Amino acid sequence: MEGTSSKAESTLQKSSLDVYTESNKRQHKSTSDSDTVILSVDMESSQDLDSDEDNTPGLDEFSGLSSYERKRLKNISENANFFASLQLSESAARFREMIKKRQPPESKRKKPKKRENGTGCRRSMRLLKVDPSGVSLPATPTQPTLIADENPLLPPGPLEMTPENRDDDSELFKRVLQTWANVSKTSSKNTEKELANIKSYKANLSGMVINEDTVHKVTKGAVFSVALHPSEIRTLVAAGAKSGQVGLWDLTHQSKEDGVYVFQPHSQPVSCLYFSPANPAHILSLSYDGTLRCGDFSRAIFEEVYRDERSSFSSFDFLGEDASTLIVGHWNGTISLVDRRTPGTSYEKLINSSLSKIRTVHVHPVHRQYFITAGLRDIHIYDTRHLNPRRSQPLISLTEHTKSIASAYFSPLTGNRVVTTCADCKLRIFDSSCISSEIPLLTTIRHNTITGRWLTRFQAVWDPKQEDCVIVGSMAHPRRVEIFHETGKQVHSFFGGECLVSVCSINTMHPTRYILAGGNSSGKIHVFMN
């Protein structure tokens, strides 16, 4: 009997060891498996805990044992199951802790504290004003930096007509000025002009040529304005430059260099230049610097006519045929009426127009109470008899333009036409024979007017001899200057070959002779003549 009980006890111990070994195996297997293994382990542990003691393996085989032996065997079996379930529960708890460790932390990561004594980035001791030994340098007194004005305004009052490109005897220059003054006295003043036949006009244009002797650099920088002296015997070209210079070129001299004289009456671009219709010995120049001067050949000075340092001028024209009264356009949209007979250099009347900017102003050649202004997008025609200093409303507004406008001019003899130049690559011609509430559009000419940043903008102008034809520069290759009829047909193109290899943005015609002068953006003047 004792042998039997000892056999049963050893069998139960063996079964408990097998259960313990099986739990260890499950533990090791679960460490390498996923969450599915954890669920299986929990299920197995719950099944072992819920199992009845009668299901203990090996008890049915020893049914003949005494109650004491049965009770002892039962205790041994319960202890084995308890230790097995305990091992399984501990392994499941370990896995749950491992899973929790893998989850991201709920709180944000705290920024590490800066090291107080740590080594920072290297900094220049010179910028810290510390010498190499570590001693602070004495503070240097700061001196105010003076920014030099790129275009300082010239002093008020008359300026001597002294050429900048001449260092020779002044007596020679005085003789030249005297020659120009004498030529001006003998200029033709015949105002009765008739339009030439278009066929003969084309023939005369075909006879105009250019050569190396009629091309020369006159000013420094781009040419913003050109004028031709009305003399019938001498060819005198005037050019206004971006640098504020006014250059005079007398083509009658044998050498080109001997006939060029450059002056500095302004500090900013000279956008408008005219010889006086009453006295051609006077040349009037207007500049962005807010000054309008009159160069007098007989007195050899540039007299100051109008000055406004708070404003910038854009264009001017003569209100009276005697050139005593002027109308001046400002870039800020205001208009000044100036009387040269009044002492001083101020205006007679200042008018606020309905435009935000004014690029050009031009007076009607017959009905001189009317003048036309070119703004940013609109063309306005005003009557000087109905100008309001506070805000003047125009008689007529032309709103057909879709982009920036460069210029607007009446035809030179009758004023029956208006030509405008716009950045939408169109030249427009209007019928201004009857100035009423509106003037109709006659012709639209397609023409490339996109000159870019570095070239002076195109301005289509009328030929004073043939008021039904306009002259304008061209971006086409080979380089040329073109003439169009008011109907839109091309009349003539001036080609120069190797003598004309750049764009002539600003052009003008002689009032009586077949001479064309054009200026480019480097200061060169190109002259076509027959």
Image (cartoon, grey):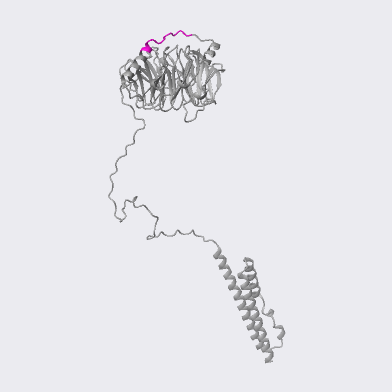
Say which of 367 and 211 sits in front.
Answer: 211
Please say whether residue 418 is one of the residues in the magenta stretch: no
Residue 16: name its quadrant. Answer: bottom right
318 relative to 13 in the view: left or right: left
| Most common secondary structure along the magenta stretch | loop
Residue 182: name its quadrant. Answer: top left
Q: Residue at x 39, y 57 (%)?
A: 120
**Range drawn in magenta:** 182-193
Marker count (numbered): 0
Say which of 70 and 169 sits in front.
Answer: 169
Above or below residue 49? Residue 234 is: above
Of all residues shown, which one is farthest toward the front? 254
Viewer can see residue 271: no
167 relative to 495 in the view: left or right: left
Above or below residue 456? Residue 202 is: above
Q: Residue at x 31, y 17 (%)?
A: 299
Residue 249: name its quadrant. Answer: top left
Q: Position of residue 78 (x, y in %)?
A: 63, 80
Above or below residue 245? Residue 205 is: above
Q: Position of residue 142 (x, y in %)?
A: 29, 43
Viewer can see residue 472: yes
Q: Position of residue 93 (x, y in %)?
A: 57, 70
Say which of 312 and 293 sits in front.
Answer: 293
123 relative to 35 in the view: left or right: left
Q: Quadrant of the N terminus?
A: bottom right
Q: Residue at x 57, y 68 (%)?
A: 96
Q: Position of residue 61 (x, y in %)?
A: 72, 84
